[in-house]
């Protein structure tokens, strides 16, 4: 069966389930328990939200940039949905960083941290590119939000990014 | 490299004064003579000028005298030592530590240029020199991994890819933060608060604590065992370069706080984030084959940070002091 399209509603639902389940036993076995204890401690108290953008979705998937909104509460994902190009772009609810311009029309949704990545890098993550290097090589970037606060949860974020990368999805080739 | 003192011999000695002769030996040795220089003296030398920090032009002039050619190193004896004399346990420990440096050097090379934009003209000279130093250090590790360890690849990135499996998951804390801080400066290079936060991570934590600690672990091992002469020579010369970087970085932070005392809160907030991530490990690394215990490495990290804060005159509040006690080593540097 063909997997759902990247950045579709079905994909976002699968991402929600995968994040709620967390890293696999195989992933956990490769790192020390104290690291996972730290991960669980962050997850159990994490109340922030991420707007994970794809800046250049191919026209087969979207007519413009879109975001995967992941809201954390009570130790799990309380909301996971796609914010499309027809919706107002996200703004950061946290202090710090540059304030994004407020677009006209309906109120934009707020995320604690707004991040952006190009389509090719999302695809590379799905194909197994390392999540730590995705951050370190600035393939995904924090566009809005408090950087020092964001990094207090960086191990949690990187492990979740790796989980998102494993969720099955179709990534069509962008037109040449 | 005839001396055979234990790698941790000076750990509990505390600060000590270097003689004029020792300082001359460190400052004036050409690359071929660096093999004779004691790494403990070089690390002590880093701290020598922290209480009266040199200006950026002086640091630039030192750079011109001390720069070395990474292609002058001959790794043929290191290759024999690595494959025929070192034990499997020694190689595993060594490479687990050195890989953090291999990647760290690359990271500090590419994240530094944006910091130059908002710097004074004199500091720009120093930073330009530092970027060249970091590029040379990246090549040093590239050569070590190709010619000694035996990793294969056509490009520098191929070798980085090949050594990445040894890099700990906690590497992303200082170096991911640095990448994002560099991006913050890219967007607003004259934001002095952002520059101080960046400088705290780069110059105080990554270079002043992580790099010097990791250098000491591998170099004191090489000196103790009498192994890896080209690694010892190149990396001790790297440590001498780092002394200029740390002194320049501490000069920048000290000047920033003197100009605006409110900047101290940016240093504290950055340390809070860094230290909140420094109490956890994702992998166990055996230091014992290199002559160190876990507790001795932890103590080394603590001492490196404490000395710099004291010497530069940066007070820290009790909550940061408490976090300092829980540091666990990130095996990386740059």
Image (cartoon, coloured by chain):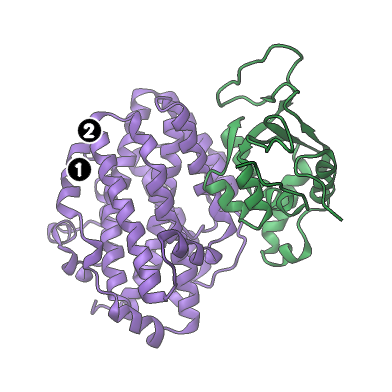
Measuring from the top left, give residue B199's x and y in whole percent.
Answer: 41, 38
Q: Which mark is residue B122?
A: 2
Q: Nearer the viewer, residue B199 or B133?
A: B133
Query: In what quadrant of the picture does the N terminus of chain B appear?
Result: bottom left
Q: Could you say where residue B306 lies in the image, as x and y percent from the top left?
A: 42, 48
Q: Which chain is purple?
A: B
**For the residues marked 2 and 1, what is the alpha-carbon distance in whole angstroms?**
9 Å
Q: In the rendered view, does A9 fall on the left or right side of B15?
A: right
The residue at the point 50 percent across, 68 percent down is: B96
- In this rendering, the answer to whether B259 lies above or below B41 is above
Q: Is residue B132 visible?
A: yes
Q: Which chain is green?
A: A
Q: Residue furthest top?
A: A104
Are the two marked residues, 2 and 1, in contact with CB atoms closer than 8 angstroms? yes
**Vertical placement of B230 versus B115: above or below?**
below
The residue singled out by tag 1 in the image is: B60
Residue B84 on image: x %, y %: 39, 88
């Amino acid at each position: 069966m063909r997997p759902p399209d990247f950045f579709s509603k079905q994909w976002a639902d699968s991402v929600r389930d995968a994040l709620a389940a967390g890293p696999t036993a195989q992933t956990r076995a490769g790192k020390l328990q104290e690291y996972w204890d730290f991960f669980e401690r962050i997850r159990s108290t994490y109340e922030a939200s991420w707007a994970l953008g794809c800046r250049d979705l191919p026209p087969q998937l979207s007519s413009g940039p879109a975001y995967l909104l992941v809201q954390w509460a009570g130790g799990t994902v309380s909301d996971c949905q796609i914010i499309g190009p027809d919706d107002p772009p996200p703004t950061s609810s946290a202090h710090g960083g540059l304030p994004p311009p407020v677009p006209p029309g309906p109120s934009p949704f707020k995320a604690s941290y707004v991040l952006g990545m190009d389509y090719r890098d999302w695809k590379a993550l799905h194909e197994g590119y390392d999540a730590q290097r995705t951050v370190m090589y600035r393939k995904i970037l924090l566009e809005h939000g408090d950087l020092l606060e964001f990094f207090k949860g960086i191990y949690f974020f990187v492990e979740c990014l790796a989980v998102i990368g494993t969720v099955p999805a179709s990534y069509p080739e962008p037109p040449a | 490299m005839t001396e055979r003192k234990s790698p941790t011999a000076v750990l509990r000695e505390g600060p000590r004064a270097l003689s004029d002769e020792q300082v001359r030996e460190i400052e004036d040795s050409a690359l071929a003579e660096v093999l004779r220089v004691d790494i403990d003296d070089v690390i002590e030398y880093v701290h020598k000028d922290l209480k009266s920090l040199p200006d950026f032009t002086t640091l630039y002039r030192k750079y011109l005298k001390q720069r070395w050619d990474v292609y002058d190193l001959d790794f043929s004896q290191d290759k024999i030592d690595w494959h025929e004399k070192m034990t499997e346990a020694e190689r595993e420990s060594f490479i687990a530590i050195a890989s953090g440096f291999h990647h760290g050097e690359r990271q500090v090379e590419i994240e530094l240029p944006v910091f130059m934009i908002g710097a004074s003209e004199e500091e720009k000279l120093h930073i330009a020199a530092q970027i060249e130093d970091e590029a040379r250090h990246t090549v040093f590790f590239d050569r070590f991994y190709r010619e000694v360890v035996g990793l294969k690849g056509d490009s520098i990135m191929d070798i980085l890819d090949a050594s990445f499996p040894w890099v700990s998951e906690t590497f992303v804390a200082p170096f991911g933060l640095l990448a994002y801080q560099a991006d913050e400066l890219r967007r607003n290079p004259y934001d002095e608060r952002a520059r101080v936060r960046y400088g705290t991570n780069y110059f105080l934590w990554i270079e002043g604590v992580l790099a010097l600690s990791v250098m000491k672990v591998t170099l004191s091992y090489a000196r103790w065992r009498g192994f890896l002469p080209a690694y010892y020579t190149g990396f001790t010369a790297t440590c001498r370069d780092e002394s200029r970087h740390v002194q320049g970085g501490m000069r920048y932070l000290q000047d920033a706080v003197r100009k605006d005392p409110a900047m101290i809160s940016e240093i504290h907030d950055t340390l809070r984030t860094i230290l909140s991530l420094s109490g956890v490990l994702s992998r166990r690394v055996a230091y014992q084959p290199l002559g160190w215990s876990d507790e001795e490495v932890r103590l080394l990290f603590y001492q490196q940070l404490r000395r710099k804060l004291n010497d530069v005159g940066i007070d820290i509040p009790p909550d940061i002091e408490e976090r300092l006690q829980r540091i666990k080593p990130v095996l990386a540097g740059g």
